[in-house]
C-alpha cells in the first residue's frame, strides 16, 4: 500500500469521528518523533537547507541556535526560525 492508496482510503472510507481522531493523533505523534530525531541530528554550526514557502526556493544557512521546537538558521544576514523536521544537513554529514 502506498501513500496514494492510504489517502484515497481515508477520503473515501466511512470512518467514525473517533477513528479519524485516532488517525490524526497518530500523524501528530509521528511528526513530533521526526522533529525530535532531526533535533538530535543537527548541531550549532552545521550547514543545513530547507524549503522556504515564503520565497518558493531552497534556503541554505548555518545553525545558530537550537530551541525546544525550532532551530534558528542564519541565511545571509537574516535569521530564520525553522521547525527541525524541515531541515536537511548539507555537506560531509549529509
Image (cartoon, helix red, strand yellow):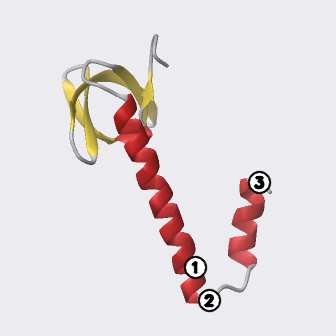
Residue drawn 49% across and 19% down? 94
The spot of residue 24 in percent (x, y) is 51, 70
Pointer 2 with pointer 1, Cβ within 8 A? yes
How far apart marks 2 and 1 lie (CA) works out to 6 Å
- Are there few (<14), some (14-19), or many (20+) residues within 10 Å of tag 2? few
- How many discs appear? 3
Q: Which of 45 and 61 is in front in this view?
A: 45
Secondary element at tag 3: loop
Q: Farthest residue in the top direction?
A: 92
Q: Which of 28 and 78 is in front in this view?
A: 28
How far apart marks 2 and 3 lie (CA) works out to 23 Å
Pick whichever of labels 2 and 3 is earlier in the sequence: 3
Q: Mark 1 points at which residue?
A: 20
Q: Can residue 53 be spotted in the picture?
A: no
- Residue 33 lies left or right of residue 62; in this view the side is right
- Residue 13 lies left or right of residue 34; in this view the side is right
The spot of residue 50 in percent (x, y) is 42, 32
Pick whichever of labels 1 and 3 is earlier in the sequence: 3
Residue drawn 36% across and 34% down? 40
Q: Farthest residue in the bottom direction?
A: 16
Secondary element at tag 2: loop
The spot of residue 91 in percent (x, y) is 45, 12
- Are there few (<14), some (14-19), or many (20+) residues within 10 Å of tag 1? few
Q: Mark 2 points at which residue?
A: 16
Residue 2 is labelled as 3
Q: Which of 3 and 93 is in front in this view?
A: 93
Residue drawn 21% across and 41% down? 67
The spot of residue 86 in percent (x, y) is 43, 40
Residue drawn 36% across and 40% down? 84
- Are there few (<14), some (14-19), or many (20+) residues within 10 Å of tag 3? few
Above or below, 28 relative to 31: below
Amino acid at each position: 500500500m502506498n501513500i496514494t492508496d492510504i489517502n484515497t482510503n481515508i477520503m473515501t472510507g466511512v470512518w467514525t469521528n473517533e477513528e479519524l481522531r485516532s488517525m490524526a493523533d497518530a500523524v501528530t505523534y509521528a511528526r513530533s518523533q521526526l522533529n525530535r530525531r532531526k533535533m538530535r541530528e543537527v548541531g550549532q554550526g552545521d550547514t543545513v537547507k530547507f524549503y522556504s514557502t515564503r520565497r518558493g526556493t531552497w534556503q541554505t544557512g548555518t545553525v545558530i541556535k537550537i530551541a525546544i521546537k525550532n532551530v534558528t538558521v542564519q541565511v545571509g544576514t537574516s535569521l530564520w526560525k525553522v521547525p527541525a523536521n524541515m531541515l536537511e544537513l548539507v555537506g560531509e554529514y549529509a
